[in-house]
Amino acid sequence: MNGFFRAMEAEGFSGCATASVRKIACPNCGFRFSLVYARAVACRGCPEACRGCPQVRCARCDSEFPVGISPDVNGKAQERTLADHICRIVNEHNESRGIETANR
């Protein structure tokens, strides 16, 4: 699996792009999912999902934990950068469907 992320980086994808699709495990139930999946599925409908929320919600058990659980995040600055990146993805998706989102 690391080869996939190395290939993404070799093609010029940013660290945030690779981190947002890397699978992480829920510390509560062990379900493995990507951060983008969590925002698109488990956080759908939550107004904070489009405002740089530093939390992740598991789609299986509905527990919430910090984005910092990702092995790609080292510190609050990277946590915020990754959260903002994921928010941009969600906002762009919503805008492409005519859904207005309120940003911070």
Image (cartoon, helix red, strand yellow):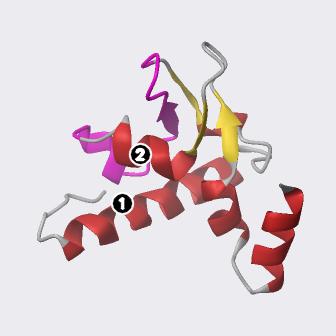
Q: Position of residue 68 (x, y in %)?
A: 68, 38
User: What type is the residue that disc 2 sits on?
Assistant: Arg
Left/right placement of residue 2 relative to residue 20 reads right
Q: Position of residue 71 (x, y in %)?
A: 80, 43
51 and 95: which one is in front? 95
User: What type is the residue that disc 1 sits on?
Assistant: Val
94 and 81: which one is in front? 94
Q: Which residue is mark 1?
A: 90
Instruction: Give the main secondary structure of the magenta stretch.
Output: loop
Magenta stretch encompasses residue 29: no
The residue drawn where x is 32% and y is 42% is 48
User: Residue 59 is drawn in which quadrant?
Assistant: top left
User: Residue 26 is drawn in which quadrant?
Assistant: top right
* Residue bounds of the magenta highlight: 45-62
User: In the rendered structure, are the residues bearing label 2 and label 1 in contact, judged by CB atoms less than 8 Å apart?
Assistant: yes
Magenta stretch encompasses residue 47: yes
Q: Which residue is mark 2?
A: 39
- For marks 2 and 1 on the same chain, the one whose residue lies earlier in the sequence: 2
Mark 2 is surrounded, within 10 Å at the Cα level, by few (under 14), some (14 to 19) or many (20 or more) other residues, namely many
